[in-house]
Amino acid sequence: MIGISEVLETNEMIEHENLDVRTVTIGISLLDCATTSVEGTCAKISAKIRRYASRLVPTADSISREFGIPIVNKRISITPISLVGASCCRSPKDYVTIAKCLDSVAKEVGVNFLGGYSAVVSKGMTASDRLLIESIPEALASTDVICSSVNVGSTKAGINMDAVRLMGEIVKKTAEATADRDSLGCAKLVVLCNAPDDNPFMAGAFHGVTEEDAVINVGVSGPGVVKHALESVRGESFEVLCETIKKTAFKITRVGQLVAQEASSRLGIPFGIIDLSLAPTPAIGDSVADILHEIGVEKAGAPGTTACLAMLNDQVKKGGVMASSYVGGLSGAFIPVSEDQGMIEAAECGALTIEKLEAMTCVCSVGLDMIAVPGDTPATTISGIIADEAAIGMVNQKTTAVRIIPVIGKTVGDTVEFGGLLGYAPVMPVNQYGCAGFVNRLGRIPAPIHSFKN
């Protein structure tokens, strides 16, 4: 039973500490939508998404009103489209047609984003995978709510360096294709290692082939709640600090569990997972960097930052798994630059660099996220950054990702405005030494020795 004190406490977190359910995401399998024609495939895709997702937005809005819990986004994740389009797509243009179909039906049902314009190429690329990847720049330039992801490595398979090299080029082409919008297309494109099948957060969400026909996944966020809780134990021991984070994460996850169960019941779709990720927004008081500051580092990026983040991530997960039997996705702390006011300030004053962010990604939920860099950054340098992050994920058996934005026409010192949840970002400097000789080698980096556990 939920007592009155818990209700009042939750209301306080919502009213004054920026607690929200960041997303209710419905995952839909499109494997049965494949046909031998692009038109036929699009028709089946549209029909299936309408069948499962037409009531998602009104249902989430109804739950939000009834329980007084803000639900910020309603999203769809789908089977990686390179699998669905393999039987009918013979050119990148064919995949762009499917992207436009997905964009149209997503807008029709009213969701904020649709993720799954994706390929999983950890060990190698099929012809279909390559066609989809080559279509990404045009697809993201000609749609509004489509998000794309490519998984280039895993602990079991190693790193597909051919895909890493190609994705450096694709990121650049996507930036150029959306140059009139400050290269916004790159904000909807992420390159992953060890991508989970059940992630409700964009841009990396897709519906894995091991999932049911449809599931409800919920992402909860509450960095403001955690910061507020830590203010009450300022100066206390690490034991008190950790217990406070853990108990707070438990309370936040309970809110997500309630919303997930209600959405599942009302939509008649099985509940999948709760993703408890401290995902910040540009709003004041909703920052992961502010939590790190409250723990004791002067600015995000100062010595001690990585240790603080490791502790925060671990305690968030420990608290979350006690509140729900099905915690999954990414779960932990995100450290996007443009979406976190404290991170933005740390980058602007020089406390936070890409190299320090890379070190922090060893212990956070994802990786280098929403980082604006000069538009003239070479594709091989972007590939090198992707390879570094993939190596961290592969060796540490965790998900890592790169969402980097080479903003055409911008350089270090400029600021880029993306708007909404995406916020704004200072253009950060990139190491000027090249890695083309490394990136241009063919083949893949083998899996690490500890992957052989059969």
Image (spheres, grey):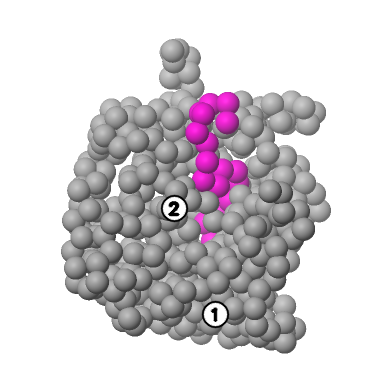
- Label 1 CA crowd tier, 10 Å (few <14, some 14–19, many 20+): some
Q: Residue furthest front?
A: 454
Quadrant of the rendered image containing residue 336: bottom right
- Label 2 CA crowd tier, 10 Å (few <14, some 14–19, many 20+): many
Quadrant of the rendered image containing residue 361: bottom right
The magenta stretch spans residue 230: no
Up-down: is 112 above or below 153? above
Q: Position of residue 271 (x, y in %)?
A: 38, 35
Q: Write down the region rendered in magenta.
A: 321-340
Write the residue at 40% across / 61% down. Answer: 80
Q: Position of residue 367 (x, y in %)?
A: 62, 58
Determine the secondary structure under disc 1.
helix
Label ID, residue 1 = none
Dot 1 amino acid type = Leu
Q: Main secondary structure of the magenta part?
A: loop
The answer to whether the residues at label 1 and label 2 have Cβ atoms under 8 Å apart is no
Q: Position of residue 181 (x, y in %)?
A: 40, 76
Up-down: is 245 above or below 308? above
Q: Is residue 94 left or right of residue 357?
A: left
Write the residue at 65% across / 78% down. Answer: 443
Label ID, residue 166 = 1
Residue annotated with mark 2: 208
Q: CA distance from mark 1 to mark 2?
A: 23 Å
Query: Who is closer to the viewer here, 287 or 115?
Result: 115
Q: Position of residue 152 (x, y in %)?
A: 57, 67
Write the residue at 66% across / 65% down. Answer: 158
Determine the secondary structure under disc 2.
loop
Dot 2 amino acid type = Gly
Q: Nearer the viewer, mark 1 or mark 2?
A: 2
